[in-house]
Amino acid sequence: MRLTPLSWVKLGFLACILCVLELSGSASAASAHIHAHQHAKSSKERLEDGAYSPRDEGHFAGGDHHQEFDHEAILGSVKEAEEFDKLPIEESKRRLEILLKKMDLNADQFIERHELKAWILRSFKMLSDEESKDRLEDADSNEDGKITWEEIVHDTYGSDPEDLALEDKLIENDKALFEVADLNKDGYLDTEEFRAYSHPEETPRMLDLVLKQTFADYDKDLDSFISFQEYLGDKAEAHGKEWLITEKEKFDHGYDKNGDGKLDVSEVPAWLIPSNDDIATEEVDHLFAASDDDHDDRLSFDEILEHHDIFVGSEATDYGDHLQDIERFQDEL
């Protein structure tokens, strides 16, 4: 077959892609969302509707399934998940089997749904601890192992007076969170206190303040309820009819438990705070669907090890991602 000049260009471009993938050890140079861990950002970041970001945000996004969430849900660490991605298959399986023995509470060589769910919930806590620790280390400018309010402001908002003025309301809310998180009132947050500050939605003692701030932001008529219009705020103008219908469905059937058309203080948490319990249940369903080959509603060690790439990843997982990148670029060419 004679190659046209355009074909040579395509082949050359594909070769460049292969070189980049090989040199970087990652597909991120070719596609920003491929095999990139998505949980490094602060859990304090809110979604458009004001709710805290759920733990599984990005697990399924834009029609793509991101296995990184599955790996982190088993390993309880972004760093560990990244390390497993670089392991040879046999070493990945060896380490996974060690975890399975810890996960297997009754030592019967099977992982039941409740055992997997308990493990995933444990992993979620470990992930929050890791995120909080990393954020503290980033903001701790004098490296004394604790953090002041001034260090948080500088790390989060910078030092430009104009920028600080623009973020005045957010800074005010964050300062209130800092003060409640600071249990001993010494002006510093240690590791545990900073976790309460950085993950208030997962810290029961912070809930009263989270609710107070939410009502201050949304309850415009000060009647101690949040109506659907207040829930929407000014976001409705930027969206179409389908978005409004979806939000109304969530409001009426997901949050407004007593059906009175507004949210009281007992109903707001269902909107604001994602349920890690529900997310863990969905993740169990997902992992079982992907690996319960004999459909006996329990996972043998062999089934999990056979599908190790789903649970923890390895070099084989990276290689598969590289092939997908190449196929995608071939299609685009």
Image (spheres, rainbow, N blue to C red):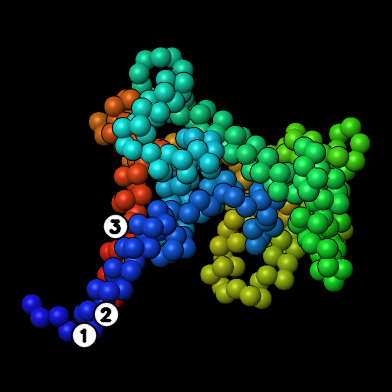
How many numbered circles are shown?
3
Residue pointed to by mark 3: 323
Measure how far apart labels 1 and 2 are at the Cα level. 6 Å
Mark 3–mark 2 CB contact (< 8 Å): no
45 above or below 99? below
Tell me what residue is drawn at x 72 percent, y 71 percent. Answer: 234
Q: Which mark is residue 5?
A: 1
**In the figure, 136 relative to 64: above or below?**
above
Distance between the alpha carbons at the discs numbered 1 and 3: 25 Å
Is residue 286 in view? no
Q: Looking at the image, which residue sits at the far bottom?
A: 5
For mark 2, give the secondary structure: helix
Residue type beneath disc 2? Val
Tell me where residue 107 sits by quadrant: top left
User: Where residue 278 appears, x then y in whole percent?
Assistant: 54, 39
Instruction: Tell me if I can see residue 243 in this picture.
Output: yes
Left or right of 117 in this view: 206: right
Instruction: Give yes or no for contact between labels 1 and 2 (Cβ–Cβ under 8 Å).
Output: yes
Image side of residue 306 versus residue 288, left or right: left
